[in-house]
């Protein structure tokens, strides 16, 4: 069943790239309908159908012509459903439990380990509005490709050192149980979804809201700081130090995005840090 969850997550994301509307908007419903037969609730499937419909209405410009009030209503519904998917709280949803109250690495807190598909559904929807592989920021030809190539590993090392210095994690070089499943699920459900949200949609939302009298450099820096701070606060459940580390990590992902203009590179940097965490440090946090 774990392999099925991973395959569904990957296919959900892949379906967003289809040129066929039937595949793009139909395949997610078919995939999750099949999964409902095995483990998900029919109630969740009703919300899936609504989410797909709302995404279709918002993503097709001709659907929104001269319908300002309807577009605002659909956007509100989309935001509520997206929030439910991101925090795994949409009614009727239950992830696949792999391990309950289990210590995955020495000196680490016990964890309930789930495989999920709901954040992958959010990724599918977000990809209807924000590109993953194509450039979504203006090109800066003065930036050499070597700069982001160095920024990702060096920034990852810096975030790791900051995390260790705060005490939320300690060095524990060991491959945890379920490593491959965790790593693949982390890529398809966590990294893609969070980068599309915080570096894609949030960048797009914050950018035009800032004062127009700022210099280009100040404007870009402020967008980076705001989106990184929001990313950090979103990890409040881990405590103040976790918020700090997540904010610094957000600055890293945002910087890579600004340097490359493509969200995929922020996704890969995010995944690099998370996999490094899994292999070299206590996971998810140190058991004090």
Image (cartoon, helix red, strand yellow):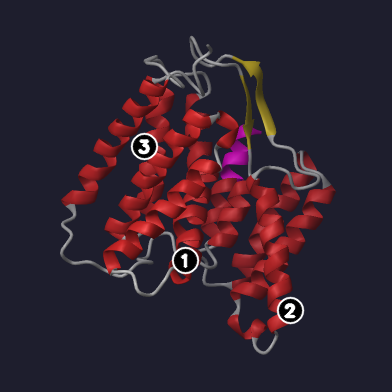
Image quadrant in which you'd find residue 77: bottom right
Q: Which of marks 2 and 3 is nearer the N terminus?
A: 2
Q: Which of marks 2 and 1 is nearer the N terminus?
A: 2
Q: Name the residue under label 2.
A: 70
Please identify, in this view, whether the residue under mark 2 or under mark 3 is nearer the observer.
2
**Residue at mark 1 to residue at mark 3: CA–CA distance:** 24 Å
Q: Which residues are the magenta region?
A: 1-8
Label 2: few (<14), some (14–19) or many (≥20) C-alpha neighbours in 10 Å: some
Our reading of the magenta stretch's main secondary structure is: helix
Verify whether residue 5 appears in magenta: yes
> As drawn, is 272 to the left or to the right of 191?
left
- Image quarter hosting the N terminus: top right
Q: Helix or strand or loop: what does disc 2 sit on? A: helix
> Which residue is outermost to the right?
43
Verify whether residue 232 appears in magenta: no
Q: Which mark is residue 272?
A: 3
Q: Helix or strand or loop: what does disc 1 sit on? A: helix
Looking at the image, which is closer to me, 250 or 101? 250
Label 3: few (<14), some (14–19) or many (≥20) C-alpha neighbours in 10 Å: some
Q: Mark 1 points at which residue?
A: 204
> As drawn, is 130 to the left or to the right of 134?
right
Q: Earlier in the sequence, mark 1 or mark 3?
A: 1
Image quadrant in which you'd find residue 167: top left
Label 1: few (<14), some (14–19) or many (≥20) C-alpha neighbours in 10 Å: some
Q: Which mark is residue 8?
A: none
Q: Helix or strand or loop: what does disc 3 sit on? A: helix
**Residue beneath the point at 53% across and 37% down:** 185
Spot occupied by residue 234 in the image (x, y as percentages of width and height): 56, 43
**Residue beneath the point at 65% across and 88% down:** 65
Q: Relative to residue 175, is residue 17 depicted above or below?
A: below
> As drawn, is 83 to the left or to the right of 214?
right
């Amino acid at each position: 069943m774990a392999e099925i969850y991973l395959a569904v997550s990957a296919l959900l994301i892949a379906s967003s790239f289809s040129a066929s509307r039937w595949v793009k908007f139909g395949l997610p419903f078919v995939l999750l309908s099949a999964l409902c037969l095995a483990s998900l609730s029919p109630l969740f499937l009703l919300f899936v159908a609504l989410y797909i419909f709302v995404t279709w209405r918002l993503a097709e410009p001709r659907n929104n012509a001269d319908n300002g009030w309807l577009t605002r209503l659909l956007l509100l519904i989309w935001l509520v459903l997206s929030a439910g998917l991101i925090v795994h709280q949409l009614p009727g949803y239950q992830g696949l439990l792999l391990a309950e109250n289990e210590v995955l690495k020495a000196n680490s807190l016990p964890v309930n380990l789930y495989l999920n598909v709901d954040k992958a559904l959010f990724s599918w929807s977000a990809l209807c509005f924000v590109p993953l592989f194509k450039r979504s920021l203006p090109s800066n030809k003065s930036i050499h490709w070597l700069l982001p190539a160095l920024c990702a590993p060096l920034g990852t090392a810096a975030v790791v050192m900051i995390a260790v210095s705060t005490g939320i994690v300690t060095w524990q070089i060991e491959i945890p149980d379920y490593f491959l499943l965790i790593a693949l699920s982390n890529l398809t459900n966590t990294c893609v979804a969070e980068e599309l949200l915080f570096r894609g949609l949030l960048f797009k939302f914050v950018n035009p809201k800032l004062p127009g009298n700022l210099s280009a450099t100040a404007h870009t820096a402020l967008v980076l700081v705001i989106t990184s701070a929001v990313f950090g606060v979103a990890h409040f459940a881990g405590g103040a130090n976790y918020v700090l580390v997540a904010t610094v990590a957000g600055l890293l992902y945002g910087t890579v995005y600004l340097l490359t203009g493509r969200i995929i590179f922020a996704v890969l940097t995010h995944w690099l840090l998370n996999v490094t965490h899994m292999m070299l440090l206590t996971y998810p946090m140190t058991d004090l």
